[in-house]
């Protein structure tokens, strides 16, 4: 089926120039194609739009009414297309950004003032939750995900690595001792993160590929890393969480990192994830989304701020 908007444009040009051939030259189309567009319009509308004679064209009453509508609607369509195209070139409009609660509060929200100064025409709506949101269904432009990404139609860019660490309060380590091997964690109070199987309430996983697993247990489990950090600082047990959650407590000595005989799991990353891009040769995310992804990448590369000036871990 021929495109309706193009048909309206062709009809308006034919009516304005009074000639199929002149309209064809102006539009860069063949006269046959111009005739087909007008015929398709008339067939779809069920009315004749033009009186055709060997010498001239004239509009029917229905044609005059339809031309008025075309002349009103076509500029509005053109303006809508310009606005959408501008969104691809200039960062502007509402950007809905989703991030995990703890990471978003500590490491995304403080950056948004600087982003706003760089891009004053962008309004950011920051949504904080730890569940896996559906970007398309819920209308998010961008999400920060801290995980190992599987195959997906979503567009992802890795922004920074995630380094995990086991640590405890000095008071806890003095009372219970410092474990040297992951197997020794069985005998310690381990605070479990219920939203993760790898560092959960019943087992902790180690190794670059997760090849080592040890059963753990403790008197507290929670679905929020901040709560676990505060419990660890209070001496309730050991914690196994990302450095970005623990950096301040590590720097000021409220928590002490522990070196074990197996490396912490190493497959996590911080990713910016976008909905699938539209089909077509000019596939490109809106400028506001690209601006935010580039801004966050610059903020966290080559070394994320949470990795700076950390004390050495103990063994």
Image (tube, rainbow, N blue to C red):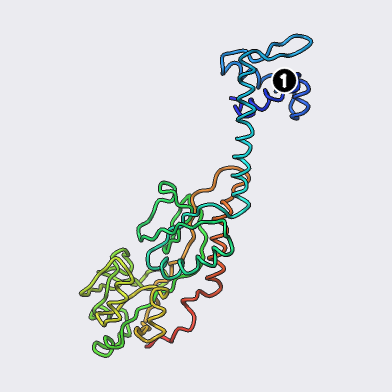
Residue 153 in the image: above or below residue 114:
above
Q: Quadrant of residue 49?
A: top right
Q: In which quarter of the image is residue 61?
A: top right
Q: What's the residue at 37%, 64% (across, down)?
A: 101
Most extreme residue toward the left is: 219
Residue 64 in the image: above or below residue 262:
above
Residue 124 percent across, percent down from the top left: 49, 58
Q: What's the residue at 59%, 47% (across, down)?
A: 283
Q: What's the residue at 45%, 61% (across, down)?
A: 144
The front one of 43 and 145 is: 43
- Image quarter (top left, top right, bottom left or bottom right) of the C terminus: bottom left
Query: Horizontally, is 234 left or right of 25 in the view?
Result: left
Residue 215 percent across, percent down from the top left: 25, 72
Residue 176 percent across, percent down from the top left: 24, 87
Query: Horizontally, is 181 left or right of 38 in the view?
Result: left
Residue 137 in the image: above or below residue 177:
above
Q: What's the residue at 76%, 22% (across, down)?
A: 17
Q: Mark 1 sits on what residue?
A: 32
- Image quarter (top left, top right, bottom left or bottom right) of the N terminus: top right
Query: Horizontally, is 18 left or right of 305 in the view?
Result: right
Q: In which quarter of the image is residue 233?
A: bottom left
Residue 65 percent across, percent down from the top left: 61, 19
Most extreme residue toward the top is: 53
Most extreme residue toward the bottom is: 174
Residue 278 in the image: above or below residue 217:
above
Question: Disc 1 on helix, strand or loop?
Answer: helix
Query: Horizontally, is 95 left or right of 178 in the view?
Result: right
């Amino acid at each position: 089926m021929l495109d309706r908007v193009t048909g309206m444009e062709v009809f308006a040009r034919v009516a304005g120039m009074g000639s199929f051939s002149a309209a064809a030259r102006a539009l860069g189309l063949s006269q046959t194609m111009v005739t087909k567009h007008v015929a398709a319009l008339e067939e779809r509308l069920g009315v004749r739009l033009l009186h055709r004679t060997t010498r001239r064209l004239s509009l029917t009453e229905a044609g005059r009414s339809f031309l008025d509508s075309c002349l009103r609607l076509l500029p509005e369509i053109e303006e809508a297309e310009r606005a959408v195209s501008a969104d691809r070139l200039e960062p502007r409009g509402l950007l809905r950004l989703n991030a995990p609660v703890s990471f978003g509060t500590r490491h995304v929200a403080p950056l948004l003032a600087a982003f706003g100064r760089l891009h004053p025409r962008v309004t950011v709506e920051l949504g904080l939750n730890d569940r896996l949101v559906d970007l398309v269904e819920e209308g998010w432009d961008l999400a920060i995900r801290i995980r190992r990404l599987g195959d997906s139609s979503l567009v992802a860019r890795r922004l920074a690595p995630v380094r995990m660490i086991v640590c405890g309060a000095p008071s806890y380590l003095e009372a219970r001792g410092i474990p040297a091997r992951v197997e020794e964690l069985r005998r310690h109070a381990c605070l479990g993160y219920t939203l993760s199987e790898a560092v959960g309430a019943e087992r902790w996983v180690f190794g670059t590929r997760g090849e080592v697993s040890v059963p753990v247990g403790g008197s507290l489990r929670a679905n929020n890393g901040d709560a676990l950090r505060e419990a660890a600082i209070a001496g309730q047990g050991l914690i196994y969480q990302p450095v970005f959650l623990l950096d301040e407590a590590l720097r000021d000595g409220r928590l002490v990192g522990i070196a074990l005989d197996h490396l912490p799991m190493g497959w996590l990353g911080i990713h910016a994830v976008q909905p699938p891009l539209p089909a077509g040769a000019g596939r490109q995310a809106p400028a506001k989304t690209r601006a935010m992804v580039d801004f966050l990448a610059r903020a966290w590369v080559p070394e994320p701020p949470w990795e700076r000036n950390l004390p050495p871990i103990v063994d």
